[in-house]
Image (tube, rainbow, N blue to C red):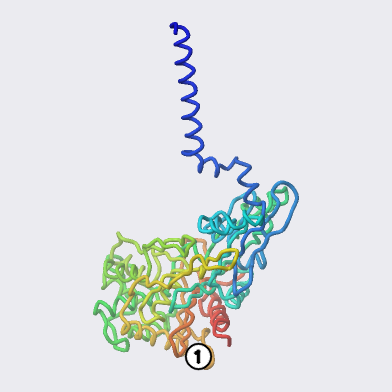
């Protein structure tokens, strides 16, 4: 072979080798990246070429699929979309998916590896690809009570089964209907743009992702820390709590919401009934930031967790002085919590101190209704001992019968409650909180946290947890109890 021919052969061989390397790289190394690329139209066509699996609430689907025109054959539909949006999220041909629709996208679309045998059988029998279902823990009656109770106000409500961690209700208002932008047409784009510009932010999940000062609801954690660390042993014994009380290192008096309440040297129990800031603020300051934070973290603060949707992280601050610790002890300052976290605090007390990990999905099942995955309740922590939890239960039950928590009472049922009014920044209305639980012979089947953000139509004198949030909590508990 002469020299020029040899050069051409080497060059041709190198080009062929480069082509093979490139093809191998694209086909195997970048296959997943390219198959999920936002501009790969074939992926979208495949995803919407058949009906999607469903999200199930109370044994019935709250989602569906509707045939349409164009190469994207099916679009997502939602029943009572606004009521369930904080649970389902959305599935859109143009804007992707979120929450349970997003987390379980592969299962719902039928591409999950766990459906391999089902897909193989369908190919052999000539059936189209089918998606699996997501069975939620939501109690439809409790969800309806929470959503309708909040009405047209900004707010959130969460109900848990303290014994297992099942999320029974997860409501956020104002809400939105995911059906209005589930397609890819002009109307869908207009609806999406309007939601993005809405000043009330209806697509924000206030129950799961937004954080707020929890106000006096946090006093149950401060009480737990005081009892746990020996600052107090008898919930009915007088405390050393002056009224007025000046916070350490300042000249600022910590005010009580009700200036006529018997807060001076009040017991933890009486102070809970009357929501005395001086008693619980001083207790927090005396405990110190480290002890109070350690207790808060056992109740779920400063942790990231998934339900399986990622929940917002509730924070107990680290670098704070004694007066700032006092503010944290009454649920103010830089302390923040999601409504889910506040419900978890309540549930841990109702469950004799045991905090169960909250979860939203009971079961994942295939298109043939076979079980693919079933959730097992999991203990998240031992927040406090059973003895301390029972003392706080008595305080919350006394608060419901003798103090500020009367709005939660249900005839023939033992109920514990606690109000909260949380201050925010300058120019913002206070938040109204209410937490409660109901007791049955086998423990507490429900614990509730409700938060309401009043608008300008509500006078400041009318903003209280008992007035605005308490009746909603009672309705949710009644729905779970069937009363």
- Rendered image quadrant of residue 88: bottom right
| Residue 340 on image: x %, y % | 47, 69
Q: Residues within 10 Å of mark 1 (few under 14, many from 20)?
A: few
- Rendered image quadrant of residue 265: bottom left
Determine the residue positioned at 47% across, 88% down.
Answer: 440
| Residue 148 on image: x %, y % | 63, 74
Residue on which disc 1 sits: 413
Q: Does residue 26 lie above or below 238 as drawn? A: above
Q: Does residue 105 lie above or below 326 as drawn? A: above
- Rendered image quadrant of residue 268: bottom left
Left or right, residue 126 beside residue 348 = right
| Residue 402 on image: x %, y % | 45, 90
Between 274 and 399, the one lying in front of the other is 399
**Farthest residue in the front direction?**
1
Between 210 and 406, the one lying in front of the other is 210
Left or right, residue 325 beside residue 213 = left
Determine the residue positioned at 69% across, 49% down.
Answer: 72
Left or right, residue 160 beside residue 148 = left
**Farthest residue in the bottom direction?**
412
**Farthest residue in the right direction?**
69
**Farthest residue in the left direction?**
230
Q: Secondary structure at mark 1?
A: loop
């Amino acid at each position: 072979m002469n020299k020029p021919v040899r050069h051409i052969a080497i060059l041709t061989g190198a080009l062929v080798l480069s082509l093979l390397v490139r093809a191998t790289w694209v086909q195997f190394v970048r296959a997943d990246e390219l198959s999920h690329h936002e501009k790969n139209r074939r992926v979208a066509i495949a995803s919407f070429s058949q009906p999607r699996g469903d999200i199930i609430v109370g044994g019935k689907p709250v989602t569906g699929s509707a045939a349409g025109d164009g190469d994207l054959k099916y679009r997502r539909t939602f029943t009572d979309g606004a009521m369930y949006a904080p649970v389902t999220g959305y599935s859109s041909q143009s804007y992707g998916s979120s929450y349970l629709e997003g987390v379980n996208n592969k299962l719902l679309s039928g591409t999950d590896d766990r459906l391999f045998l089902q897909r193989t059988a369908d190919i052999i029998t000539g059936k189209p690809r089918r998606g699996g279902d997501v069975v939620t823990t939501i109690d439809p009656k409790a969800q309806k009570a929470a959503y309708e109770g909040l009405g047209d106000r900004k707010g959130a409500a969460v109900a848990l089964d303290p014994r297992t961690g099942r999320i029974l209700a997860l409501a956020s208002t104002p809400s939105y209907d995911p059906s209005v932008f589930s397609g890819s047409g002009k109307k869908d784009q207009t609806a999406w743009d309007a939601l993005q510009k809405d000043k009330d932010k209806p697509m924000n999940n206030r129950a799961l992702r937004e954080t707020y000062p929890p106000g006096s609801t946090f006093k149950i954690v401060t009480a737990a820390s005081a009892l746990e660390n020996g600052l107090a042993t008898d919930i009915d014994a007088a405390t050393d709590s002056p009224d007025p009380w000046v916070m350490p290192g300042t000249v600022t008096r910590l005010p009580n919401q009700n200036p006529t309440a018997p807060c001076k040297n009040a017991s933890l129990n009486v102070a809970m009934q009357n929501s005395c800031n001086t008693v619980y603020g001083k207790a927090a300051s005396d405990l110190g930031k480290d002890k109070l934070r350690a207790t808060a973290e056992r109740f779920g603060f400063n942790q990231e967790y998934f339900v399986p949707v990622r929940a917002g992280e509730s924070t107990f601050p680290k670098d704070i002085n004694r007066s700032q610790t006092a503010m944290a002890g009454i649920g103010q300052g830089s302390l923040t919590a999601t409504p889910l976290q506040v419900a978890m605090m309540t549930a841990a007390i109702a469950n004799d101190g045991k905090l169960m990990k909250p979860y939203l999905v009971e079961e994942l099942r295939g298109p043939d209704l076979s079980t693919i995955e079933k959730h097992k309740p999991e203990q998240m922590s031992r927040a406090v001992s059973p003895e301390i939890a029972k003392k706080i239960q008595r305080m919350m039950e006394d608060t419901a019968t003798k103090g500020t928590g009367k709005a939660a009472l249900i005839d023939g049922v033992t109920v514990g409650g606690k109000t909260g009014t949380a201050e925010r920044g300058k120019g913002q209305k206070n938040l109204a909180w209410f937490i409660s639980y109901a007791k049955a012979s086998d423990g507490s089947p429900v614990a509730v946290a409700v938060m309401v953000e009043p608008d300008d139509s509500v006078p400041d004198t009318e903003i209280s947890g008992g007035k605005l949030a308490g009746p909603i909590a009672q309705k949710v508990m009644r729905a779970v109890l069937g009363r």
